[in-house]
Image: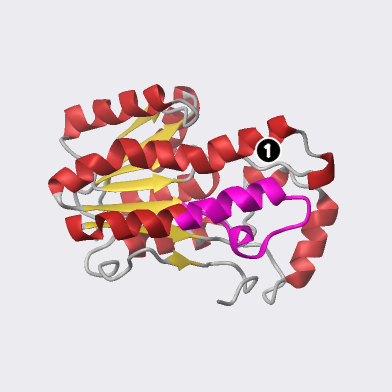
Amino acid sequence: MLSDKVALVVGGASGIGAAIARAFVDEGAYVIVADRTLESAARTAAHVAAAGALSIDVRDQSSVDSAVEQLVSTRGRVDILVNSAGILTEAPLIEMAAERWNETLDVDLTGVFRCCRSVVPHMVAARSGRVINIASQLGIKGGRGLTHYSAAKAGVIGLTKALALEVAEHGVLVNAIAPGPIETPLVAGISEDWKVAKRSELPLGRFGVPEEVAPTAVLLASDPGGNLFVGQTLGPNSGDVMP
């Protein structure tokens, strides 16, 4: 389904990103796993049989640009960009330090901007490409103790819609996935009280696992399956949000 497509999975060393990398490999894509440290990216790349690994720090535009140029120079193009890098902490807004707010917005939202800013011009020039941004259902409904994260993910959804409008005419399709709570290292750091309360709200009564999110990314990346998705936010979320 994705035979010979060049896919860059940013934040691909663990969790949803790693599951997407594996799913893309299974569909025949040439997958590069990128993460903040090359060691973790390379470890996951070997585990999922990806083509290679790159170090990308989404907080640093020069780091992003350097990695993208390295990939383009060796493969000639980037067909699929997955923005899955992120951090998640928990604090009520009235107790939240500005540094924590700024860090979350920088990684979870501005990091997506930086990666799109680096990759999308290559896609526009090629008149072909797919961008898949990993948002969250909390960007739609919010979450107690997670105002910073909710705001960042709402921004990802807004960025996705606006960028989709700008580049669809150039053959580049931009969409988002807004998962519900997923059993990942990211969620592991949230308090058990929060997780217990969250499970009780879900119609399915359980969190998902990364392998249940990855097929949505395959759909959005595929031809013809993803051809009509433009600026959409798909929600594998255990029923937490029903638009």
Q: Which residue is at a point 64% across and 44% down the rendered structure image?
A: 186
Tell me the quadrant of the picture where the N terminus can be found: bottom left
**Magenta portion: prevailing SS class:** helix
- Residue 212: in magenta span: no
Q: Amino acid at mark 1?
A: Trp
156 relative position to 67: left or right: right
At horizontal 57% and vertical 57% (from top left) the residue drawn is 136
Q: Which residues are magenta?
A: 134-158
Determine whether 208 is above or below 4 in the image.
Answer: below
Q: Position of residue 156 (x, y in %)?
A: 49, 52
Q: Nearer the viewer, residue 209 or 61?
A: 61
Give the residue displayed 18% in from the left and 53% down from the top: 128
Give whichever of 68, 154 is nearer the camera.
154
Judge whether residue 177 can be spotted in this image.
yes
Q: In the displayed structure, would residue 27 be above or below residue 13?
A: below
Residue 83 in the image: x percent, y percent?
Answer: 43, 45
Instruction: Give x and y (percent) for residue 22.
Output: 40, 48
In the rendered image, the vertical position of residue 224 relative to residue 177, given as above or below: below
Residue 143 is a magenta residue: yes
Quarter holding residue 241: bottom right
Q: Which residue is mark 1?
A: 101
Snapshot quadrant of residue 122 = top left
Is residue 23 at all visible to an observer of this figure?
no
